[in-house]
Image: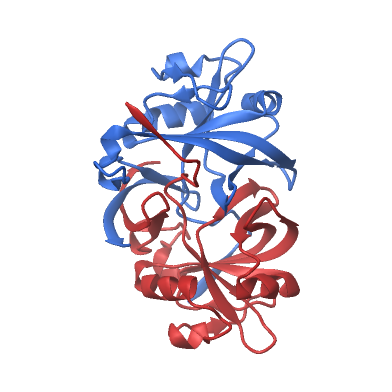
Chain colours: A blue, B red
Amino acid sequence: MKKELNPTTAVVPCPVVLLSVVGEDRPNIITLSWVANVCSNPPSIVAGIRPQRHSYEMVKNAGDFVLNIPSIDQIDAAEFAGTKSGREFDKFKECNLTPVPATKVNSPMIEECPINIECKVTKIDSPGVHDVFTAEVVAVHVDESVLNDKGRFIASKANLFTYLPLNGEYWSLGKHIQT
Amino acid sequence: MKKELNPTTAVVPCPVVLLSVVGEDRPNIITLSWVANVCSNPPSIVAGIRPQRHSYEMVKNAGDFVLNIPSIDQIDAAEFAGTKSGREFDKFKECNLTPVPATKVNSPMIEECPINIECKVTKIDSPGVHDVFTAEVVAVHVDESVLNDKGRFIASKANLFTYLPLNGEYWSLGKHIQT
């Protein structure tokens, strides 16, 4: 038996990303879950950001950003960067994260995150309270500690986690069940 | 130390959804991972679909679809519906899945999936080889077996899984680590 709920954002499980963006005074970080790969070629992603957020204008002005995929080591940083504002806090400093130069965009990457995805904004849509940025992936960096000697991603070493908006829980990944 | 890879769809972990859509002859199912919640109000999602896929024209014609979130029990169906074409196969029949009427859209829901998200298409974009459908969520159904007596989603009972496009692996969820 099914129960009908009010319409809501019920896609699960969701990625959690730390979006880093260059700024006039200092770079900023915002944690997002309204994010996905949406096109394989050119590789493109979308990211939903509320216009009220400090990072929103920063992304619009920069025209680029980096999606940094955190491991569980960065879950407290993800919580901080998702709930505090860059207007009040230097989030790199508060979260003990290190900005390092990207290769193709002006926004910095977060050194501590195992995966960094450099993106250039191509489009902004406004379906409602979140604006949706479409961006092309222009470079990807992966920490050698989560790659095998053939350059293949080893998920068991990355300690990824996921977010379930249906109940607000963060979950670790479990086991590799199929390829 | 980081290694720079060619630009690719590197957001991880990703949802896996079975999109069901009404058709003239029979309904169809396509498995997608290029999917996300992108806007909280009105609740909206995006789904990337290649125009070559049989479901693409079906979704365009129907103007609606259902995103069905599978449990691990449906992983073989997800694999089948993601790699075979609805032009050749009746995927509901081949996968032993049951189409049941939705309440707000013409496309059917998949009874066996614990979560069904009814969606109406609002926009189609073309960033590249995938077109990106934006759609508003108009109803959500959740199986009572994954809800507690207060109607809260109990993730441990849903046996969700996730997809990692970086290496093509499906992973189960592990533990609840934070709220």
- Indicate the position of residue B158 as horizontal and vertical percent values: 38, 63
Residue B93, placed above or below residue B115: below
Up the image or down, A172 lies above or below B4; here it is below
Q: Is residue A61 left or right of residue A179?
A: right
Image quarter hosting the N terminus of chain B = top left
Say if residue B104 shows up in the picture.
no
**Whole-percent x and y of residue A149?**
24, 41
Residue B66: image location, x then y, percent: 60, 69
Residue at horizontal 66%, vertical 89%?
B25
Question: Going 64% across and 24% down the picture, which residue do you hit?
Answer: A54
Give the residue drawn at x 55%, y 21%.
A28
Instruction: Using residue A39 as the reference point, say whether residue B93 is left or right of it.
Output: left
Residue at the spot x=65%, y=28% of the render?
Answer: A59
Q: Relative to the observer, which residue lies in front, B81 or A35?
A: B81
* Residue B123 seen by the camera: yes
Q: Position of residue B164 (x, y in %)?
A: 40, 52
